[in-house]
Image (cartoon, rainbow, N blue to C red):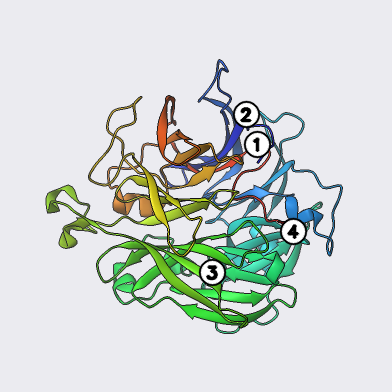
């Protein structure tokens, strides 16, 4: 938290029209006072089309210093970037010129499938003994999905992580509590349930993921599944407490079939028991809307669901940020008491119906989707694209890509920086952001 403020942000830029041009890794100047502040100053196009870049991460992090798996000479210089649709993984070196990353390695999908049995890599996290990656499907693009490991330094794919997966079939995110030797994973769906868009029939039948899974981190065996209820559809981002002495974390749930609300759930240890429990601690209601203002998928409901698609937790574990991509709202909660969150801030940008404007723009489409927070907790970066096939369902006119920055007050509350509004070329849409030197979701810690 005391490290120098970031001056650059790296952004996954997705082909907006579908296999027409390569995705790219963009570099944005985020240094106030710079002549190019808030502008795209670098861009590396990928060598192929159809990758659909997703949740990328650094090769090195604070957990590399853990005593049971130390890597004392690691440096945070490589970005590992998965292609969710192509199953191709790209490795970029940012050290020679941070403003123009170099593509130094490409792992092809046949290599990934042969060494892990998986496809559709989704999320990258640095861990003590390697780079962890989640994958949505098996080599054939069906279930089960799971986790595989890569080497920190060579980026060779080591193999499948699970020894015994128990009942787990769906995958999405994975994080851990190093102090409790526990890995946590969440659920979305298999590639066939996702790649052509949200399938209404499966959704209404409660067929998307609704479990949290808890694993023995060292033995790589499934311990426990916690069912949030079949009405709670799509358990996505996981944010464990950064303090390794704390045994709790937060999970975002996209949609409730009961009333189109979205929610955030707290997982926590149950006393001295080995079991984990989960409870809903935040519920965000749907907002009524005129049928003619809604996309076809939502007309019959006459309401806009919040669609919580990302959450982020500050490094001091005080503030939780919740992206409501459907209603166009970013919410801030004080979670000093994780069992009793208190809302402390809200910012409206875009939204399916609201189209709320930024100080430097007219009405916006899309909404706060990916959210990243600086290490000191004072700056929040937002982008507005979720996943191309799903973008078209909820925003049928297409997503005009934008990135904004919000300034956070120390005691809570946030407001848009009027001088930071970046609109992207219409052929590209921004997704995840990573910050120079690390950010609030790049590290796990061995010491409190």
Badge nearest the viewer, 2 or 4: 4
Residue located beneath label 4 in the image: 446
What is the C-alpha distance between the residues marked 1 and 2? 7 Å
Q: Earlier in the sequence, mark 2 or mark 3?
A: 2
Return the x and y of residue 173 as percentages of the image width and height.
55, 63
Q: Are the residues flagged by discs 3 and 4 in contact, CB closer than 8 Å?
A: no
Pick out the residue farthest to the top.
35
Badge nearest the viewer, 4 or 1: 4
Residue located beneath label 2 in the image: 7
Return the x and y of residue 137 as percentages of the image width and height.
55, 69
Q: Are the residues flagged by discs 1 and 2 in contact, CB closer than 8 Å?
A: yes
Image disc number at residue 436: 1
What is the C-alpha distance between the residues marked 2 and 4? 27 Å
**Residue 168 or residue 258, whichever sits in front:** 258
User: Above or below — where is 36 with respect to 209?
Assistant: above
Q: How crowded is the residue under tag 3: few (<14 C-alpha within 10 Å), some, or many (20+)? A: many
Image disc number at residue 171: 3
Regarding mark 1 in the picture, which secondary structure is present there? loop
**Residue 432 or residue 119, whichever sits in front:** 432
Q: Residue at x 62, y 29 (%)?
A: 7
What is the C-alpha distance between the residues marked 2 and 3? 34 Å
Residue 121: quadrant of the picture: bottom right
Return the x and y of residue 343 as percentages of the image width and height.
38, 51
User: Above or below — where is 225 with respect to 232?
Assistant: below
Badge nearest the viewer, 3 or 1: 1
User: Above or below — where is 178 with respect to 22?
Assistant: below
Task: Note whether residue 11 is visible.
Answer: yes
Q: Earlier in the sequence, mark 3 or mark 1?
A: 3
Regarding mark 4 in the picture, which secondary structure is present there? loop
Q: Residue at x 68, y 75 (%)?
A: 162
Q: Earlier in the sequence, mark 4 or mark 1?
A: 1
């Amino acid at each position: 938290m005391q490290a120098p403020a970031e001056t650059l942000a790296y952004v996954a830029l997705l082909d907006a029209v579908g296999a027409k041009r390569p995705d790219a890794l963009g570099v944005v100047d985020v240094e106030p006072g710079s002549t190019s502040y808030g502008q795209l100053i670098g861009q590396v196009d990928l060598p192929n089309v159809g990758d659909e870049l997703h949740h990328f991460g650094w090769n090195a992090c604070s957990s590399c210093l853990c005593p049971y798996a130390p890597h004392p000479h690691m440096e945070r210089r490589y970005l590992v970037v998965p292609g969710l649709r192509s199953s191709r993984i790209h490795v970029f070196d940012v050290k020679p010129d941070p403003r123009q990353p170099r593509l130094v390695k490409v792992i092809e999908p046949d290599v990934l499938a042969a060494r892990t049995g998986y496809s559709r890599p989704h999320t990258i996290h640095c861990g003590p003994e390697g780079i962890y990656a989640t994958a949505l499907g098996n080599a054939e693009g069906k279930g089960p999905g799971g986790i595989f490991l890569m080497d920190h330094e060579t980026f060779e794919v080591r193999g499948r992580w699970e020894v015994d997966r128990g009942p787990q079939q769906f995958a999405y995110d994975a994080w851990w509590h190093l102090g409790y030797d526990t890995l946590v994973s969440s659920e979305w769906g298999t590639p066939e349930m996702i790649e052509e868009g949200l399938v209404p029939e499966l959704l209404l039948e409660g067929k998307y993921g609704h479990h949290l899974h808890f694993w023995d981190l060292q033995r790589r065996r499934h311990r426990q599944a916690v069912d949030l209820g079949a009405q709670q559809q799509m358990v996505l981002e996981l944010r464990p407490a950064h303090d390794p002495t704390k045994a709790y974390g937060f999970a975002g749930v996209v949609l409730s079939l009961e009333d189109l609300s979205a929610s955030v759930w707290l997982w926590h240890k149950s006393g001295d028991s080995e079991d984990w429990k989960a409870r809903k601690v935040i519920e965000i209601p749907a907002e009524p809307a005129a049928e003619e203002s809604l996309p076809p998928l939502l007309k019959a409901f006459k309401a806009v669901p919040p669609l919580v698609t990302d959450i982020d937790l500050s490094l001091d574990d005080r503030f939780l940020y919740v992206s409501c991509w459907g209603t166009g709202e970013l919410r801030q909660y004080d979670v000093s008491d994780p069992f009793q969150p208190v809302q402390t801030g809200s910012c409206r940008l875009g939204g399916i119906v609201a189209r709320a404007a930024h100080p430097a723009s007219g009405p916006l489409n899309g909404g706060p989707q990916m959210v990243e927070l600086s290490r000191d907790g004072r700056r929040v970066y937002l982008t507005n694209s979720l996943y191309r096939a799903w973008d078209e369902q909820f925003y049928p006119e297409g997503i005009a890509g934008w990135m904004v920055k919000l300034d956070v007050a120390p005691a809570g509350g946030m407001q848009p920086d009027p001088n930071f509004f970046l609109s992207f070329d219409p052929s590209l849409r921004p997704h995840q952001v990573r910050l120079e030197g690390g950010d609030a979701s790049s590290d796990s810690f061995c010491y409190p």
